[in-house]
Amino acid sequence: MSRKLYTFNGGVHPDGHKAMSNGTPIRAMTLLPRYIVPLRQHIGTPARPLVAAGDTVLRGQTIGAADGYVSTAVHAPTSGRVVAVEPRAVPHPSGMFDLAVVIESDGADRAIEFQPLDWRNLDPSALRNRVRDMGLAGLGGAVFPSYIKLNPGGQKIHTLILNGAECEPWITCDDRLMRERAPELVRGIEIMRHALGSETVLIGIEDNKPEAIAALRAAAPAGMEVIAVPTRYPGGGGKQLTYSLTGVETPAGGRSTDVGIQVFNVGTAYSLYRAVELGEPMISRVATITGHVAQPGNFEVRVGTPLSDLVAAAGGALAGASGELIGGPMMGFDLRDSDAPVTKAVNCLIVKNPRLFPAKPIELPCIRCGACAQACPADLQPFEMYWYSRAKDFGRAQSYNLFDCIECGCCSYVCPSHIPLVDYFRFSKSEIWEREREKRSADQARVRHEFKVFRLEREKQDKAEKFAKAAEKSRESAASNAVTPADPDAEKKKAILQAALDRAQKTKETVTPKNTENLTSGVQKEIDAIEARRAKVEEKTESHE
């Protein structure tokens, strides 16, 4: 009984141009004298360099360690000497430079000792850690670290989908991989099912690849269903393929794992097989070289291979070439530097000429015809998103579910005004992300400032308490030193002085008037002296008390 298929909205039927490169087997490239290995080859944080200029490395040796949760390792594609760890041009729409390890090959291609895993008897968590160390990342476009996608996180993943649709025009690397290496690919799928605990495994392949469908059906064991899906772009989008095979819609702003489904590219499954059963880290991938070249085809390319050497391996560009395109014509971008290397994300290089890729028409005003909305496979309103993106009203653009856009290019393909709609959407997304980063940085700076103020106040308070304790101790010490020993004769001396004062007073009262002035003066001096001595005695007595 055949499985019921569902039809997603929108989509287009561009010319495939696949016959140009899918007629010959995968070829292995010869060893090159130099490789440039970027440390950022996946979504997330780039790998942290583990080597420096002058170090010698072996094929498969880790040269960049995973740095953070969304990160994965990077390995040497051959043996040789590291000549630099420096910024180099990388395949990116902006033509950006990124940190890379430059390796000069020694020609021996010596490798580390690869260690296969007994994955059937291995805990899924330990298996995922090994996958992270082996540098696996998704080969279907997003280049998301594979070990994260293999972690259900306590969520039940009841269905595993393998994406072999390869709907983008010109690209045929997955087609040839499924034709030639189906048994190994199936072994990789079994490893995925073990890690996820999935009950159902579906392999979706567009019906314009009959040889690949036949090869996988012959290799797949019971419990794996190979399904031919209608050829329509973007039938290979994760959400679109999930709906086509299961009828389950991925929630807006969510992922397929939210509905218990996980999707992997078939190339990722093959790389997983090599990593686990052969112990070989991800140091190569199959890539298509096609277009205006002498010998279009698919090559097993080592990561770090300069793209100019990939063109040379296909016989070189023919006369009249007008540039190169990374990826397909729907979602790809122009290559700005031919010395940029192959990364894990590079699945195709197309050499253009004016006949195959004519100059883009002039952009005209939007006429609100709605063709873009009809073609959108994500059921969005591209013309509304365009107006707000163009006006830099990013909040309103986001309110139209901007981040549900998969950037497939269907809207740009059908637009009669030739508006590069996806470019506007990418611009809006990057601006929103940048503002979010700035907000997070500002929040972190505010938290740091508030903590600094709190710390300074606490230090000030601690210092004041310390000084107060020191002053109290000083006062206690001074009071202790001021106390004099008790004088046992103090009261006796007081009585003697009082008696002397009484006598002086009595004498004063009995003198004759004629001598009164002189006598009074003398007696007064004696009284003053006695009073002074008395005051001293009383002062000492009070101090003691």
Image (cartoon, rainbow, N blue to C red):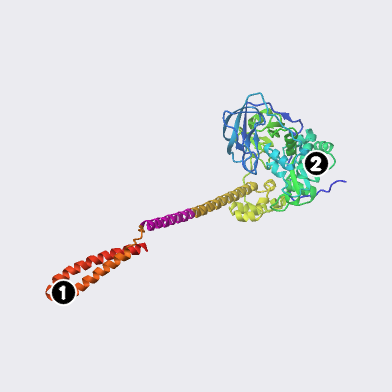
Can you give x and y, in whole percent of width and height, for residue 53 in the image? 57, 30
Q: Residue 405, relative to residue 73: is it above or below?
A: below
- Image point 76% across, 38% down: which residue? 119
* Label 1 crowd bin: few (<14), some (14–19), many (20+), radius 10 Å: few
Name the one closer to the observer, 216 or 130. Answer: 130
Residue 422's disc number:
none
> Which quadrant: the C terminus?
bottom left
* Label 2 crowd bin: few (<14), some (14–19), many (20+), radius 10 Å: some
Q: Are marks 2 and 1 in contact (CB under 8 Å)?
A: no
22 left or right, relative to 218: left
Q: CA distance from mark 2 to mark 1?
A: 148 Å
Toward which corner of the image does residue 230 lie, by quadrant? Answer: top right
Reading the image, the residue beneath label 1 is 511
Toward which corner of the image does residue 302 lie, by quadrant? Answer: top right
Q: Is residue 172 located in the magenta-colored stretch of the structure? A: no
Question: Residue flagged by tag 2: what amino acid is it?
Answer: Asp
Q: Which residues are magenta?
A: 456-481
Q: Residue 59, relative to residue 448: is it above or below?
A: above
Residue 207's disc number:
2
Q: Earlier in the sequence, mark 2 or mark 1?
A: 2
Question: Residue flagged by tag 1: what amino acid is it?
Answer: Val
Between tags 2 and 1, which lies in front? Answer: 1
Can you give x and y, in whole percent of width and height, for residue 528 in the image? 22, 67
Name the one closer to the observer, 412 or 267. Answer: 267
Say what secondary structure mark 1 lies in.
loop
Name the one closer to the observer, 215 or 489. Answer: 489
Q: Is residue 475 located in the magenta-colored stretch of the structure? A: yes
